[in-house]
Image (cartoon, rainbow, N blue to C red):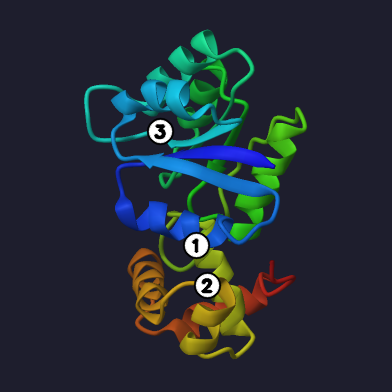
Amino acid sequence: MIKILLVDDQKILLEGLIKILSPLEDIEILGTCLLSELTEEACRRLHPDLVLMDICMEGRTSGIQICQRLKAVFPHLRVVLMTGMQEVAFLEHAKEAGADSFIYKESSGEAFASCIRATMQGMHIYPDACTPSAFGCTETPLTEREFDILRRICRNMSYDEIADDLGITKRTVNFHVGNMLSKTGYKSIVGLAVEATEKGYTGTIG
């Protein structure tokens, strides 16, 4: 059993991770922290095997700094840092801080579980630093989650079906679609889906 501590200042993300990870037979969530400064004390009290922690949190101390402290105080503790921002510099900062692995918040539930398991087996999981391809009239790349939704739209799945398939709400799907349209300049998702199909981005659904 992999015992983990979740650290993030966004309650909605913590609730989502709990919903995703709690049903898994080999993972046990010992607790959560909303403040990075409480992480070290929580580790002393709960003795987790792994800490899954956001890089950027409200408070005086960043996840990077907390990671450095945890690795110094608890040598055998595994630390996985996560972020919702597509900032390549974070990858290097995480490595320098001694983080065992790194994952983007847009990743699927399966990706989170796989990252946790692989990290506990001694592997170091870091995403490719290359950003995804851009669409439309901008060079701003789509996130992994936006690609997940776009692929399903290209396969003619309804927003309700996409929400059920990804384990998110229809409102969240609409939110991501709005972001994609804003980034690419398309007035409707149909035009973006056509471009994605032409570029071959409708492959395997994860």
Q: Nearer the viewer, mark 1 or mark 2?
A: 1
Looking at the image, residue 11 sits to the left or right of residue 91; the answer is left
Distance from disc 3 to disc 2, alpha carbons, whole Å, reads 24 Å
Distance from disc 1 to disc 2, alpha carbons, whole Å, reads 9 Å
- Please tell me whether residue 174 is drawn above or below residue 24 in the rendered image: below
Amino acid type, label 2: Gly
| Residue 19: numbered disc | 1
First-in-chain label (3 vs 2): 3
| Residue at (57% x, 21% y) in the render | 95
Viewer-proximal residue among 110 and 28 = 28
Viewer-proximal residue among 89 and 119 = 119
Residue found farthest to the left: 59
Tell me if mark 3 has few (under 14), some (14-19) or many (20+) residues whose alpha carbon lies within 10 angstroms of its own: many
Q: Which residue is mark 3?
A: 55
Q: Position of residue 80 (x, y in %)?
A: 56, 33
Distance from disc 1 to disc 3, alpha carbons, whole Å, reads 21 Å
| Residue at (60% x, 83% y) in the render | 154
Q: Look at the image and tell me whether residue 127 can be seen.
A: no
Tell me if mark 2 has few (under 14), some (14-19) or many (20+) residues whose alpha carbon lies within 10 angstroms of its own: some
Q: Nearer the viewer, mark 3 or mark 2?
A: 2
Please, what secondary structure does the residue beneath circle 1 have? helix
Q: Which residue is mark 2?
A: 167
Q: Position of residue 81 (x, y in %)?
A: 50, 34
Tell me where residue 86 sits by quadrant.
Answer: top left
